Image (tube, helix red, strand yellow):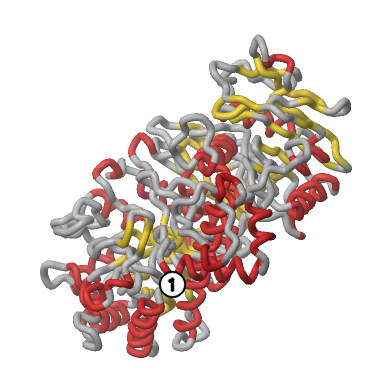
Amino acid sequence: MSKLYYGVAYYDEYMPEERLEKDIALMLETGINVVRIAESTWSTLEPKEGEYHFHHIDRVLNAMHKAGIAVIIGTPTYAIPAWLAAKHPEVMVTTAEGQQKYGPRQIMDIVSPVFRRYAEKIIRVLMAHVQHHPAIIGYQLDNETKHYDNTGRYMQEGFVGHLKEKYGSLAALNQDFGLDYWSNRIDRWEDFPPVENTINASLACAFSHYQRQQVTEYLAWQAEIVREYAKPQQFVTHNFDFEWRGYSFGVQPRVDHFAAAKCLNVAGVDIYHPSQDHLTGREIAFGGAVTRSLKDGQNYFVLETQAQGFPQWTPYPGQLRLQAFSHLAAGAAMVSYWHWHSIHNSFETYWKGLLSHDFSRNPTWQEATTIGADFARLSPHLENLRAEHDVALLVSNEAMDALNQFKPGTAQTNVYNDIVRRFYDALYDHNIAVDIINDIGENASRYKAIVIPALYAVDDALLARINRYIADGGRALIGFKSGFSDENVKVRRDAQPGGLSESCGVSYSQFTLPENVEVVACSPAIDCAQDNRAELWMELLTPAPQTRTLLRYQHPVWGNHAAATEADFGKGQAMYVGFLPQNRVITQLFDHLTRGLTLRSRTTDAHFPLIIREMTNRQGKTIAFMFNYSGQAQNAVCDRGGVSLINAATVASGATVQLAPWGFAIIER
């Protein structure tokens, strides 16, 4: 990639009037150099079966090329036309609530042979038509693909076939999954029951894993078709998303991003986040850390993020710029808004684009023009940025599935993501930049410390790799519920935390829910006098003789039990935490674990709302991004001299950089 991409999604089909030339003129004024089209418009492209209309696609491609704006073509398979649902109602996805009715998007059965036949046809027709157009720089597969909670015939038949191939013997399956319980035993493959109502967590999690595998296969299937037509220099990408809580939040439960990204040249992502007084940058950084890690640290595309968005997202002055450069600071090579214009009717009428409903210039658009100008001007300095982090956080879809089968107390949310984000946000606020990984592989030695929250379901091999990482000199902060069950969600019979007892030097057999329980420090190096409540879960830890107790529960009965411990193991150290700490305690524990280490991931001693991120550009220079995520001015200290890229001013070593409310600075050194 030779430049930064600054883009929008553009739907000529949705416009109530002739807008193309006017829009392009405004795009050029904004600094837009790429648009994304076609992924939402199967019914416009094929209004009747076998009848194809390329009017909107052709005119947009030709006009954008004439203006020098690049185009990404999306395969239009995530929203099916009405005629397909009417002719083949069996393509509608079946969930635990029954077969879905036509209307919303993303309600098709992605493993249905009938759907696949029609999807392949429309992809090939589109690709054959556009493949030689010079405006196209790449292709997007589908859109925020998931399995859509598919429990239909083909998904269940495929799952049973998968288990047959894996196990062969039903006796082995019954043993691994504990299916004798409540008479759930299966003694003939023909009697395999529907999975959606199972009370067996092992079976439910195995099915969830299989559903994610089908998403991976579906995207790989589309990628293979697209590459038959794409030119070698054109990329294939996809816009992954995350768990949705009114904004992007945590690990996506319905997709294994790491597996699904293998078929892509460039990883892509959609990141939406709270705004106004709630803008923190956490979602931008978390989504970026995940997506950057999908292709071993390569730059990624933000294919969708908000311009104005929901009414509660209308940005304060300065926030659009802060958001855009925050994406770059996480490793993005493209920032693209959903979308250019605001739609005048239908479902997303009040999800506003860069332009409002009147198509006129507005304060958000005006701010966007400054971003476009800066991207163009600073591209030589900010393209191909690389992260050089030495701290990582481990996530697992399998652990998520398993832990959410056994939610503590009255929890109703995706508890795993609650825990992951608690640890991630604490590090982010503490200015510890991390990579997000899904395994401890051969390259784990590049990390001086790894944080492992709630690794509930895990095979022996990964536990052994964690222990080996620590023994070889790594330091690990391991959260509660880790190592508890094997990969089949069967609780280990050994002392908990399973195989991690070896490195952590701690064990427990009892646990409870904390009720007005606090923790107290046993080491003078740890200060947890504030924000010291124990939340969600409480393991009654017994440390081995050589293990150091860092925290104890402050409780009349449980006060003799450790709450957090630390042990030497080989050349490294393992810290185990038996409860969900508050953010400040997490950072205290992390600082204690990494004492004596110089971390590249630690960018400053300052805390949120001042966030500093450092990347390395293609010339080998350090780019320091200084962000103020607050409505009050902040001062940041430049620990080394450099040049401010925004205003070309020289910044001396040790100088104070003043950041306006929602402001930022970029220092090259």
Please name the residue shown 42% across and 68% down the image: 153
Q: Where 623 falls versus 7 (above or below)?
A: above
The percent position of residue 649, horizontal first and vertical second, equals 50, 48
Secondary element at tag 1: loop
What's the residue type where badge 1 is placed? Val
The picture places residue 169, in percent across and down from the top left corner, at 67, 66
Residue visible at 25% across and 76% down?
Answer: 84
User: Is residue 43 rendered to the left or right of residue 526?
Assistant: left
**Quadrant of the image occupied by residue 579:** top right
- Which residue lies most toward the left here? 17
Q: Residue at x 85, y 35 (%)?
A: 568
User: Badge 1: how crowded within 10 Å, few (<14), some, or many (20+)?
Assistant: many
**Residue 190 percent coordinates (x, y):** 52, 68
Q: Is residue 659 above or below residue 73?
A: above
Q: In this view of the protein, can residue 8 be seen by the observer?
A: no
Q: Which residue is under mark 1?
A: 111
Q: Nearer the viewer, residue 457 or 396?
A: 457
Quarter of the view holding residue 556 = top right
Q: In front here: 567 or 380?
A: 567
Residue 262 in the figure: left or right of residue 144: right
Q: Is residue 4 visible?
A: yes
| Residue 207 % position (x, y) | 53, 59
Please tell me in which quadrant of the rendered image residue 146 appears. bottom left
Q: Seen from this angle, which residue lies furthest top?
A: 556
Instruction: Work out whether residue 51 or residue 568 is closer to the camera in this orientation and state it.
Output: 51
Please tell me how many numbered marks the rendered image carries.
Answer: 1
Q: Residue drawn at (48%, 34%), measured in percent from left and top?
A: 609
Left or right: 535 in relation to 520: left
